[in-house]
Image (cartoon, grey):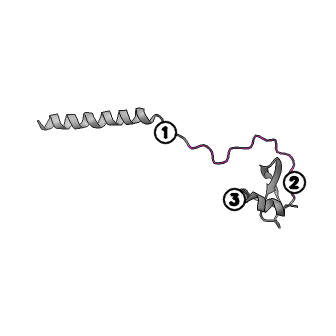
Amino acid sequence: MKKSVISIVFAIVAAGGILGYSIAGEPKKDPPKDPPSTQKADAPINKFCGVMQEHEIDPEVTYVYKEKTVAFCCADCIDEFKKDPEKYMKTIK
């Protein structure tokens, strides 16, 4: 009797797992937070960092915003820029 109950419980748990997986399908993958820009990056419009105005840019660290390539001193500045791009675009000379 004890083995029968264990076998039934195991069968229910296994069936539930299979059923749950088939209903849910494959787990969804989150899309990238910021897909790479498909726009061609032109020369940067700025010579000093778009966030840290007094720092010179690294020409390899850029972000295309409204078809304009903005350069930064480091990748952390890109993240900061994305929070309020219009604020920083006003300060870029």
2 or 3: mark nearer the eye: 3
Residue wearing tag 3: 83
Q: Which badge, 2 or 3, comes first in the chain's sequence?
A: 2
Q: Which badge, 1 or 3, comes first in the chain's sequence?
A: 1
Residue that lies at the very extreme toward the left in this rendered image? 1
Residue placed most toward the observer, 65 or 61 = 65
Name the mark on residue 45.
Answer: 2
In the rendered structure, does residue 53 fall within the stretch colored magenta? no
Q: Quadrant of residue 49?
A: bottom right
Q: Which residues are magenta?
A: 30-46
Q: Magenta region's main secondary structure?
A: loop
User: Mark 3, residues whose alpha carbon is within 10 Å: few (<14), some, or many (≥20)?
Assistant: few
Q: CA distance from mark 2 to mark 3?
A: 20 Å
Whether residue 50 is visible? no
Secondary structure state at the residue bearing disc 1: loop
* Three-letter code for the amino acid on which mark 3 is drawn: Lys
Q: As drawn, is 76 to the left or to the right of 49? A: left
User: Mark 2, residues whose alpha carbon is within 10 Å: few (<14), some, or many (≥20)?
Assistant: few
Residue that lies at the very extreme toward the bottom in this rendered image? 54
Secondary structure state at the residue bearing disc 2: loop
- In the image, residue 60 sits, relative to residue 77, either above or below, namely above
**Quadrant where the C terminus lies?**
bottom right
Q: Position of residue 75 (x, y in %)?
A: 72, 56
Q: CA distance from mark 1 to mark 3?
A: 29 Å
At 71% from the left edge and 56% from the top edge, which residue is drawn?
Answer: 82
Q: Position of residue 25 (x, y in %)?
A: 46, 34
Q: Quadrant of residue 20?
A: top left
1 or 3: mark nearer the eye: 3
At 82% from the left edge and 50% from the top edge, which residue is drawn?
Answer: 69
* Three-letter code for the amino acid on which mark 1 is drawn: Pro
